[in-house]
Image (spheres, rainbow, N blue to C red):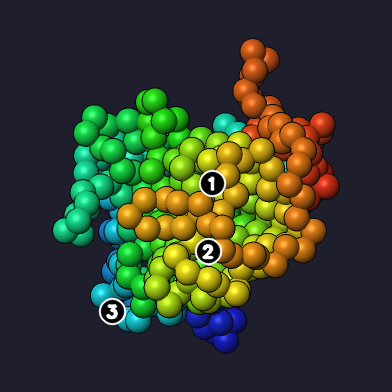
Amino acid sequence: MNRTFLVYFLVFTLIAEYAQSQTLFVDAVKGNDEAKGTAAEPFRSLEKAVSAANVFSGDEPVKIKLAPGLYLLIHQIIISPFKKQTDTVKYSIEAMIMPDDDAWSPAKMPVIQSVSANNKDYGHFNHCVGFQIERNNVSLRGLKFLGNATPGVEYYYPVERHNPDLKDLEISQCYFIGEKNSSPIQGCVFTQGSGIHIDHCIFYGCKNAVLVFLKINDFSLTNSIIYGAYEGAFWYGYGESANLPFTFRDNIISNSNYFFVGYKGVHTNYVFNNSLIANNTHYMAFNGDSISPDTLNRPIEKNIRKSGTVTLNEVTANGIPKNYLNLSDSSAGKDISAGIFKKDHHD
């Protein structure tokens, strides 16, 4: 072998292995936590993968890729800054097979369910968290979160980011599915800070879907379905944050109690675009010691439809449809690009 070629080959191999070292693979069925975390030898648990990622020191994006399977969280998963560098590197936890891939089906989606007892207490209420985000630049993609059926857990939040000084959190193409009588979700996404972007997600049967409060600059909720939120679908702002502008477009909000719960007072930056908000018990409310109807604010509404029956593709005796919990062909709002898929070729 030519000496120069050999040198280039060795350098290329080292670079490739270095880049690969920033990606970890997890398989709840075939994995082993004593393995290497590679595609050929995946870990079994998310806990092991997150622990292994914490010692990375490279500059490449970090990816934890999940094979199909059920991932039970015995404790909360804390996504922390790396010990050897700042948290400017993108950190993703995502499905190996994404909803728009040709090979995708509901059975190929990683399912995440907490079986932990209460594991978080800020001094005013004890609750359970699935993922606790404690670093910048995090992305969750193509995952299905279920409720927590553990006795004694009244408040369960699959995704929480408590620190309002953090930035950049993407949640894309994820399901959040609760069942209030058996495995409830108190709030699907309970987050603070800047750069929170929720896109093409489905929230079904949860008490509250999206809750964002402090320093929420650059927030967006787009192309998503919230159905059956039995307290409030979308909570926005607290204190000065209540006046920060946000992006709300191409969403379906239906069969919920309140559509929108905001901070008390009059606010001028509430703008809702191109969405169907129909068949909810109430429209807007104030967030205080208790929820009360908001009769003061008049949001800017651009192409907002407030009538029509939303029907979803639910599970039947014939099984689970590929586009389950997305809009049925006969549903109102079918022309709005909301749901788990970004492409329009799934029927």
Residue 84 badge: 3
- Examine the rendering and report whether any part of residue 40 can be seen: no
Rate crowding at label 1 as few (under 14), some (14 to 19) or many (20 or more) other CA atoms within 10 Å. many
At x 64%, y 51%, the residue is: 224
Q: Amino acid at mark 1?
A: Tyr
Tell me the CA gap for discs 1 and 2: 25 Å
Residue of label 1: 258
Q: Nearer the viewer, residue 272 or 250?
A: 272
Percent x, y of residue 244: 53, 76
CA–CA distance between discs 1 and 3? 45 Å
Q: Quadrant location of the N terminus?
A: bottom right
- Badge 2 marks a residue whose secondary structure is strand
Position above or below: 225 against 272: above
Residue 170 disc label: 2
- Name the secondary structure under disc 1: strand
- Position of residue 338 measured from the top left corner of the image (x, y, whole percent): 71, 49
Residue type at numbered disc 2: Glu
